[in-house]
Image: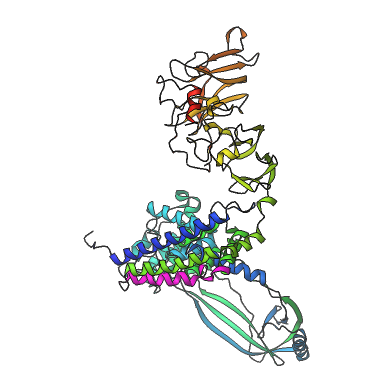
Amino acid sequence: MNRLGEPNKNEALSVDARQELDLRIGCAFTRYQTKFFQGKYGDLDSTLISYGPCQTPTLGFCVDRHDKIQSFKPEAYWVINLQIAHPGGRSIYLDWDRVRIFDKEVAQMFLNMIKSADSARVTKVVQEEKFKGRPQALNTIEMLRSASSGLGISPQHAMQVAERLYTQGYISYPRTETTQYPENFDLVGTLRQQQSSPDWGTIVRELLSTGIQRPRKGTDAGDHPPITPMRSATESELGSDNWRLYDFITRYFIATIMPDCKYLQTKVYFEIGPEKFSCTGHVIVDPGFTSVMTWKAMDDETLPEFKKDQTFSLEEAKLAERQTSPPDYLTESELITLMEKHGIGTDASISVHINNICERNYVNVIAGRKLKPTPLGIVLVHGYQKIDQELVLSTMRSAVEKQLNLIAHGKADFQDVLHHALNIFRLKFKYFVENINGMDELFEVTFSSLAASGKPLSRCGKCRRFMKFIQAKPSRLHCSNCDDTFTLPQNGNIKLYKELKCPLDDYELVLWTTGVKGKCYPLCPYCYNNPPFKDMKKGFGCNECTHPTCQHGLSQTGVSECVECENGILVLDQTSAPKWRMACNMCNVVINFFDNAHKVSVSEDICEDCGSHIVNVDFSKGKTPLEGDETEHSGCVFCDPVFKPLVEKHHARMKRRGGASRTAGRGGRGRGGRSRGRGRGKPKDKMSQLAAYFV
C-alpha cells in the first residue's frame, strides 16, 4: 500500500476513447442494419444484427477461411512410396526429397529411374542433439488457446472459470499480456506449495532438490504478472472444468522452470540413382518439462543401425496419386492467434468477441472447436465487402488502436484522436446507409421473402385471407395480399384462438402461451401493433385491452388487482378449463382455482369487502364442493368462505417476452381504473369508461 501512486491519466483517457468509439460506432451500424432487415425475410433471425469494430473483423477471419474452402479446387499430385529392406528384419520407409510432383508423366519417369537403380546407398548418417524448448510464462492469450485446443473449453467459459479460480485464491489474476516473471518473483516459494500434490508432487520435490531452471525471457507488458497457481488443490476439491484448467495452469507453471526436453535425432540420407531420399528417427535423452506437460511428450522413434556407403535392396517402389485438400475451418485457438497478430481486441476482450459472433448466430462451433460461419454471418461479411471493405478488415481496427496507444503514451490529444476517428466512421456510416441496397441484394439471394415463408394461421381483418405465421425470430404474422406485417410476443407458442375475431377490426385472435405452468392470453395482431385506445401501449394483449364490451377484454375478464405487483390486474384465463386460473397481466403471478369446474365467468357485481369482482362458478356434477350437491355458486374469490379453500397462488414459469415496455403508466386501472388495495373505491361503471373514449 505504501507504493501506491497516482493513476495514469493518459492510459485512462485511452480507455475512455476506446469505449466511446466502440459504443458510438457499434450502436449506429447495429441499430440501422437491424431496423433495415427486420421484418423483410421470413427465415432470417433479425432480432439483433450487430456490428462491432472488433467483433466484425473477428467474423471476417472466419468467413475468409470459409471462402477459401468454398473456392478451393483439388489438384492431383503424385508421390513415390519407397520401402527398403534392412538386414535386421525391419522395413524402412524413405521420404523423397522432391516430396511430390504434379505431372504424372514426370513422376512416372522418376519412378522408372529409381526402379532401374534397384538399390539404395547410404550417403550420410547425421546424429544431432536437439532440444524442445520449455514454454514461456503463461499469459491470457496462451491460456485461452490451450483451453480451447487441449481441453475443449470455449474462450468465454475458460475466462469465467479462470476468474472463479482467481476469486477463490487458487491462481493469480488471469487477465495479463505479460510472459516474463518479475525479477523479485518467488518462483521457489510458489513451487514449494505444490510438493504435496498427489498428481505432480514427486516431480516438484525432485525439481526442488536439483534446482530450478531460469525461466525463458518473455515480454513484460507492464500490466500483471504471468498466470501462476497460488495454492495447492486437488480434483475432489475443485472438480470438473475448474480442476481441468487449474491442472493445466499448474503444470504449465512447473514446466516453465524445468529443463528443456533433450533428444538425439538421427537422419540417414540415401541415394537411389539420381534421386535422394532420407529417413529420420529420434531417442529421448531427457524428457525435461514434458514429464509434467505430458501432452507435449515425444515418443522414441528408433532407427536400426546404418553406415555410410551401405546399400539396401528396394522392397517396394510405387507411384501413389493423391489430391490437394482445402484448409479446414478456423479453430478457436487459431482465431485467437489471428486476433492477437492483427491487434483485434485485448487479452480481456478477445474471448468476448468470439462469444459474441457465436451468440449472434454468425458462426456455429462444430467438432474440434472449429468455427463454421452461418449463412447470416457469410452474407453480412460479403455485404460489408461489397459496400466498404474496410468495415470488415482488421487493418482498420489496428490503425485505431495505434492512435489510442498514442493517447496512452501522451503523444496525442484525447479529443483530437476521438474527433478524427469519429469523422472517418461518420463518413463510412453515411456511405453504408446510401449503399445498403447492395447488401440487401445478397440477403435476397440467401433468405426467403415473407410472402414465401411461414404457414397460414389466422385471417386478415382487411382482406379476409389467411396471414402466414413466421416462426423465425422475431416471430410475426404477414399478410402477403395487404403486405402488412404484425409483430407478436416472443419466446412462447402462438396458435389460433377458436377462430374468434376482434370486435374492433375483424382480425382473428391468436393465443400466446408459455406452456401448462406458464401464462396464456389471447391477442389481436392488429391491436397489438396499433393500440386502439389512448391508455393502451403497443404490445398489449386482450388481457390489458380496455374495450368496454369485448368478451376477451379486461372489462369482462378482470377480477381483482394483483396481490403482489403495483399495477397488475388479475384476469380470468378463459382458455384454462378445466383447471381454471387467473393470471396477472403485468407480473408472473398465477392463481389456480375451481379445479374441474364446468364454467367460470366474471360478473359486474363487486365484493363490498375488497372491491374484487364477483365470480360465477358452475361446478361439474359429482365433483362439486358445495353442500347438497349444488353445482352453482357466486362469490368473491378472496372473501367467500366456499371459494377461499379452493384458491392456490403460484408464480408462472415465464420466458422473457418480447414486445413493448409494460411499465408505462396507463389511463385506468384494470376494470374501470380502480385504486390500489382492497376495500377502497368502487370501479366506475361501463358507461363512464365508454364516455372516456369519445373525449
Q: Position of residue 130 (x, y in %)?
A: 51, 80
Q: Which residues are magenta?
A: 386-411
Please give the name of the residue rendered at 55% of the width and 25% of the height, measured from the top-left corner: 556
Q: Is residue 629 above or below residue 229?
A: above
Give the left or right position of residue 311, taking residue 154 as reference: right
Residue 416 pos. (x, y %)? 34, 70
Judged left or right of residue 478, residue 643 is left
Q: Is residue 441 above or below residue 264?
A: above
Of residue 39 and residue 526, the one placed in the foreground of this image is 526
Query: Residue 193 or 521: which is nearer the viewer?
Result: 521
Q: Quadrant of the N terminus?
A: bottom left
Dominant SS of magenta comes to helix
Q: How is the image coloured?
A: rainbow
What residue lies at 52% left-to-right and 30% top-to-bottom? 546
Q: Quadrant of residue 328?
A: bottom right
Query: Is residue 623 something that shows in the picture?
Result: yes
Residue 396 magenta-highlighted: yes
The residue located at (45%, 19%) in the rendering is 611
Q: Is residue 327 visible?
A: no
Q: Residue furthest left?
A: 2
Residue lying at the far front in this picture: please name it: 695
Q: Position of residue 685 (x, y in %)?
A: 48, 21
x, y percentage for residue 357?
A: 53, 59
Q: Is residue 491 above or below residue 376?
A: above
Magenta-colored stretch includes residue 420: no
Q: Residue 410 or 693: which is nearer the viewer?
A: 693
How many labels sit on residues? 0
